[in-house]
Image (cartoon, rainbow, N blue to C red):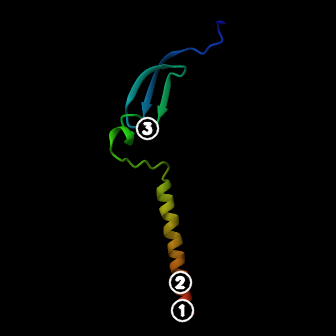
């Protein structure tokens, strides 16, 4: 094997958004993840709702705006 071509293999810490910390070894000293085996629904048996960047809220706002516009158009059609 050639020397000085491989990355350094150091002690690493994997941190989950739920607060779980896993010690391992990797080429990166710190790895940040969103879901791990402690909080993942498959392993816990409970369903957990994960809303990233308010996507559900944005969708509900667009839906409400569309429904309001459709209702306004329907009332205008009834008046004619």
Residue 70 image point, x, y percent? 53, 77
Contact? badges 1 and 3 (CB < 8 Å) = no
Residue drawn 33% across the image and 45% down it: 46
Q: Secondary structure at mark 1?
A: helix
Crowding near the residue tagged with mark 1, few <14, some 14–19, many ≥20 C-alpha atoms within 10 Å: few
Task: Name which quarter of the figure residue 42 lies in.
Answer: top left
Res 35 label:
3
Res 74 label:
2
Residue 27 image point, x, y percent? 55, 20
Residue drawn 50% across the image and 54% down it: 55
Q: Quadrant of the N terminus?
A: top right
Task: Name which quarter of the figure residue 45 lies in.
Answer: top left
For the residues labelled 1 and 3, the Cα–Cα distance comes to 53 Å
Contact? badges 3 and 2 (CB < 8 Å) = no
Task: Name which quarter of the figure residue 17 lies in.
Answer: top left
Provide the residue designation for mark 1.
79
Q: Is residue 21 above or below residue 67?
A: above
Q: Secondary structure at mark 2?
A: helix
First reached walking from the N terminus: tag 1 or tag 3? 3
């Amino acid at each position: 094997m050639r020397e000085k071509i491989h990355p350094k293999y150091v002690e690493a810490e994997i941190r989950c958004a739920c607060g779980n910390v896993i010690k391992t070894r990797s080429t990166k000293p710190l790895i940040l993840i969103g879901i791990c085996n402690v909080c993942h629904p498959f392993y816990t048996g409970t369903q957990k709702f994960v809303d990233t960047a308010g996507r559900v809220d944005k969708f509900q706002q667009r839906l409400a705006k569309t429904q309001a516009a459709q209702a306004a158009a329907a009332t205008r059609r009834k008046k004619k």
